[in-house]
Image (spheres, rainbow, N blue to C red):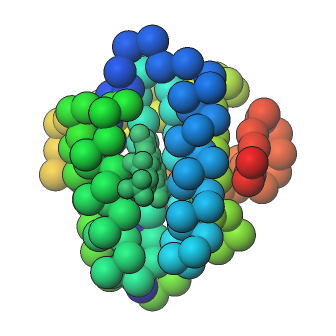
């Protein structure tokens, strides 16, 4: 099992329709490839985790890197892992509105610029996001 995280900036003026299209493509293609993960969109930034067979994850990431709807794509972390963090979602979508999560995402983005992104901080981050999504305490959409 392989896990990959990146951060990117959306093009300015990304519309809700654009986001909907991205999520539709992601959910359908990831479903075919048995890729799971989560996409966070906040302050014109995307943070995404992809997990699945290494070959599939790398192929999808290659397509994502060439996508004109975002730029400044920065790989945060990629590695083999024993288990998935997002077993139930082909692409969970999370728009942080809860102040705590907003702070958390901001910290992650800051961390990604400053440090060498230890796997620990990312694992903690995505574990937290998963718990928030599962608890349903903030507005979220699991699968379109
Ligand atoms: C932020 C962002 C996240 C994306 N996430 C995925 C994803 O998880 N899986 C996926 O297949 N495509 C994802 N896409 C869309 C791909 O870039 C690409 O458009 C899609 O895979 C269709 O590619 P194809 O027409 O070459 O098959 C994402 C695009 C963006 C901008």
Residue 31 versus residue 92 in the image, above or below? below
Farthest residue toward the top? Answer: 13
Relative to 129, is 61 on the left or the right? left
Q: Residue at x 67, y 24 (%)?
A: 97
Point 69% across, 27% down: residue: 98
Please state which of residues 54 and 40 is positioned toward the viewer in this rendering: 54
Residue 137 appearing in the image: yes
User: Looking at the image, which residue is at 37% across and 63% down?
Assistant: 60
Q: Is residue 92 left or right of residue 63?
A: right
Q: Position of residue 59 (x, y in %)?
A: 31, 69
The quadrant of the image that shows the N terminus is bottom left
Q: Is residue 9 above or below residue 143?
A: above
Residue nearer the viewer, 104 or 48: 48
Q: Is residue 138 above or below residue 60?
A: above
Q: Quadrant of residue 27?
A: bottom right
Q: Residue at x 52, y 83 (%)?
A: 83
Where does residue 139 sit, x and y in percent of width and height? 78, 33
Residue 62 location (% of width, % of height): 26, 59
Q: How many marks?
A: 0
Residue 76 in view in this figure: no
Using the rendered view, name the quadrant where residue 45 is placed.
top left
């Amino acid at each position: 099992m392989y896990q990959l995280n990146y951060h990117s900036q959306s093009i300015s003026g990304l519309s809700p329709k654009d986001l909907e299209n991205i999520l539709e493509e992601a959910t359908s293609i990831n479903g075919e490839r048995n890729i799971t993960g989560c996409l966070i969109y906040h302050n014109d930034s995307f943070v995404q985790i992809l997990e699945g067979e290494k070959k599939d994850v790398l192929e999808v990431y290659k397509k994502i890197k060439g996508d004109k709807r975002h730029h400044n794509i920065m790989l945060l972390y990629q590695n083999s892992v024993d288990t998935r963090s997002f077993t139930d979602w082909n692409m969970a979508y999370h728009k942080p509105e809860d102040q705590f999560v907003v702070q958390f995402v901001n910290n992650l983005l800051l961390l990604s610029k400053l440090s060498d992104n230890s796997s620990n901080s990312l694992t903690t981050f995505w574990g937290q996001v998963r718990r928030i999504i599962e608890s349903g305490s903030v507005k979220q959409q699991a699968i379109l």
